[in-house]
Amino acid sequence: MTAAPGTTVMSVAEAEAFAMRILRANGLAEHQAGPIARAMAAAEASDCRSHGLYRLIGYVGSLRSGRVSAAAQPRLERVAGSFLRVDGDNGFAPAAHAAGVAALIDAAQHNGIAALALTNCYHYSALWHDLDPIVDAGLACWAFTVGQCIVAPHGGNRRLMGTNPIAFGWPRAGQRPFVFDFATSAVARGEIELMGRAGKALPPGWAIDAAGEPTLDAAQALAGALLPFGGHKGAALSMMVELIAGPLIGEPTSRAAAALDNGDGGPPLGGELLIAMSPEVFTSGLASDWHQQAEAFFAQAREQPGVRLPSDRRHDARRRSEESGVGVPDMLLQELAGLSLCT
Amino acid sequence: MTAAPGTTVMSVAEAEAFAMRILRANGLAEHQAGPIARAMAAAEASDCRSHGLYRLIGYVGSLRSGRVSAAAQPRLERVAGSFLRVDGDNGFAPAAHAAGVAALIDAAQHNGIAALALTNCYHYSALWHDLDPIVDAGLACWAFTVGQCIVAPHGGNRRLMGTNPIAFGWPRAGQRPFVFDFATSAVARGEIELMGRAGKALPPGWAIDAAGEPTLDAAQALAGALLPFGGHKGAALSMMVELIAGPLIGEPTSRAAAALDNGDGGPPLGGELLIAMSPEVFTSGLASDWHQQAEAFFAQAREQPGVRLPSDRRHDARRRSEESGVGVPDMLLQELAGLSLCT
């Protein structure tokens, strides 16, 4: 890959090592830092920059303020036959995920469906990355998390919900899985932040200002509220995520988490709900072939010109990045390099 | 209730008995007809007319053509610890639901999460009604079904997916539950049919014609395709429903089901996936109070003027109907009364 002006090209492994170095330099334990660095490098490789290296700023902020425990030891508990819980010990979510995902897969393969709650932790990474090992095990799956409290309800004039993403994965033998992951807000908070950093105006319909009036300004939007995607339907889904990734698993709603925030720029308190389902169990004893049926559906989708599957763009970027590396803006790299210095 | 001109007022019980009479007159077994009549009366009472009495036309059509079995005997099977399946025996979905919902509730209360697949049946009723007994048992729950194949993918020019509704329910002690149920198309097919019957134009953005061009005409839309709600995000959700309420449970995709249709105006072949989760199990051993947390969230939503919860309108209608009955258009009643005559 030829570096664009003002960018530096890194291999995906180099991006991971760079993230690891900065997290470790800020005292984060290796078992906490490793899953974060891998998730961040995967996001850069997949051209999901809003979950890429720039999030180091927030991770480090929450470590330096002492809000997140740098040596947290996640603990897995099998609460019921199909329900597992990881207590994140006040650390970051990726280590909690790493502690529980194998047990989730095992429970779903035995019981047909199972759920895993990541609790007492801080969530700041891309959900689709959390689904990768589950779809790789041949399971359909969801992940939900309550994002930062910045979304107004349908018809409302101020923040109530988080950006509350929904991710879904479907396994495809011999092919990259069908995976989507989107905020139930009109746009992800990270996108607004990046547009603000780039001085770009927002499209209409994304946000309201602190007075509840429509705005195209990223800073005004971040001071006001984002709108849900898709009108009342998207707003209902946002409320659903707030309930199932909050109270259902004993985690705070986004507004309750916001009240605990200390302004260090890091992730809010709040975990994640993962659900896995086994197509093999669900179709056992039937004559139907779930894999062939799904592949016929995907093939029919591709017959229509202009139709792409949700994960196409990300998978394409991943292939390019694995061959040619990722281009990271020099300004960001300089800012991030400063994070590894003692304060 | 005073009858509006051209309408007849019935009590909710009378609407149910009316539906029962017509279904029974067309040879449908009592255990099949009862759950349908109850669902239909509940839809009328909740002002969800697109799932109300007018659907008798389709139910009867599919009985008269012999496509659906009038004496079907659903059979429940516990396939795995948390996965249950009802074989609908080529009957209608409501009887299959009635055969499996108690086992679903029991499995979720024991294992934390459980799923129930309704298979080998014909689905034509409102999903929210299927959630009522599950939320009444104190469980959070989902229902998904693959609707009639009439929705184009994002960026596409012809039908690929069904209207693929998603319903979600959340239990509230001492209050009507939080429930939503919406098509992942811009609008439900039934709404388009009713607008066509009333001679109304569609709003822009709902549909394309058979050539893939935007249309405001209900008949053109029904000959062409509906668009998903919420752009690429709604389209991704529609694909998700197609996968999990189709291949995942051994049921056809909407396009495969459409290929089996005989034009009798009744429901397509295709079942339903229900998932139930226990907040009591999910929060067991934790200090948090899931119910109090959720109620605080709902109270915060209601503080904002103009914000209503998704089920408010339906619950309000239900209260009114239980007191004053439902008004049914005389033209529809006459058409339906004809269905109880021998052909």
Image (cartoon, coloured by chain):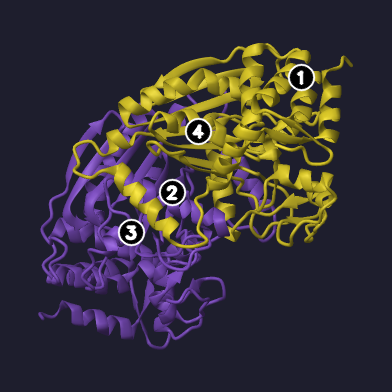
Chain colours: A yellow, B purple
Decide if residue B277 is on the left or right side of residue B79: right
Residue A283 point in image, percent of width and height:
26, 39
Three-letter amino acid code at disc 3? Ser
Mark 1 burial class by Cα count in 10 Å: few <14, some 14-19, many 20+: many
Residue B38 in view in this figure = no
Res B250 visible: yes
Give the residue at x 83% y 34%: A330
Residue carrying label 1: A22
The front one of B45 and A218 is A218
* Chain that bears disc 4: A
Q: Amino acid at mark 4?
A: Leu
Q: Which mark identifies residue B205?
A: none
Q: Earlier in the sequence, mark 1 or mark 4?
A: 1
- Which callout, 2 or 3, points at the residue further toward the start of the chain? 2
Question: What residue does disc 2 label?
Answer: B240
Distance of mark 3 from mark 4, alpha carbons? 26 Å
Q: Tell me the distance, in whole angstroms, between the alpha carbons under discs 2 and 4.
A: 15 Å
Q: For mark 2, name the chain.
A: B
Pick whichever, A287 or A234, lies toward us.
A287
Name the outermost residue toward the front: A2
The quarter of the picture where residue A121 lies is top right
Q: Chain of mark 1?
A: A
The image quarter containing residue A260 is top right
Q: Secondary structure at mark 1?
A: helix
Looking at the image, residue A335 lies above or below residue B118? above
Q: Which residue is mark 4?
A: A131
Vertical comparison of B230 with B210: above or below: above
Q: Residue furthest right?
A: A343
**What's the residue at 78%, 41% (across, down)?**
A4
Q: CA distance from mark 3 to mark 1?
A: 50 Å
Q: Which mark is residue B254?
A: 3
